[in-house]
Image (cartoon, grey):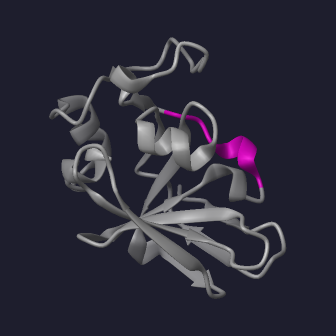
Amino acid sequence: MSRTYTGGCACGAIRYDVSGDPIVMVDCQCRQCQRASGVGHTSNMTFRAAEVKLTGDASTWETTGDGGTTKSSGFCPTCGSPVYMTFPDMPDIFIVRPASLDDPASYRPNIVTWTAAAQPWDRVDPALPTWRTAETNWTLQRMTAGITARAWKC
């Protein structure tokens, strides 16, 4: 049974409700994610965009990831909190930054991506399956069930 995930920025100007389960939960260690987070990786919960209700006006910053994918990061223009990420070429997915959840303990990563760029001091769960780069990974494709693997090129 699906549950509802709610969250938003630190000041409350941006809020979201997601009425569905995550497709996949990923810790990404690519250099761009390291720079965006200020630590060794970002954590991301991917949902179907149709399941998301978003309120408030986010500022966005568009970048191109290590694998060539364009990403748009949504953050609060008032408090600066990173809240979500979208891929302009893949409007069917919506990625939540788990720290923005009202209940961040519900984040449980399924996989670690871009381990080829990992920093030696960034300790992620060693029991998780890993993905070294943006190469095709059949396990991840099965996990995303219909969402294109291009989303994981970073």
- In which quadrant of the rendered view does residue 115 lie? top left
Rendered view: 57 above or below 8: below
**Percent from the top left, x then y, of residue 49?**
41, 72
> Could you tell me if residue 5 is visible in this image?
no
Q: Which residues are magenta?
A: 103-109
**Percent from the top left, x then y, of residue 133?**
26, 30
Does 146 appear in magenta? no
- What residue appears at the point 28 percent right and 53 percent down from the top-left corner? 151
- What residue appears at the point 51 percent right and 20 percent down from the top-left corner? 119
Rendered view: 24 above or below 111: below
Front residue of 42 and 45:
42
133 sits left or right of 31 in the view: left
- What residue appears at the point 20 percent right and 52 percent down from the top-left corner? 150
- In which quadrant of the rendered view does residue 15 lie? bottom right
- What residue appears at the point 69 percent right and 79 percent down from the top-left corner? 77
**Percent from the top left, x then y, of residue 12?**
81, 77
Q: How many numbered tags mark residues here?
A: 0
Q: Residue furthest right?
A: 11
**Percent from the top left, x then y, of residue 86?**
41, 67
Rendered view: 111 above or below 70: above
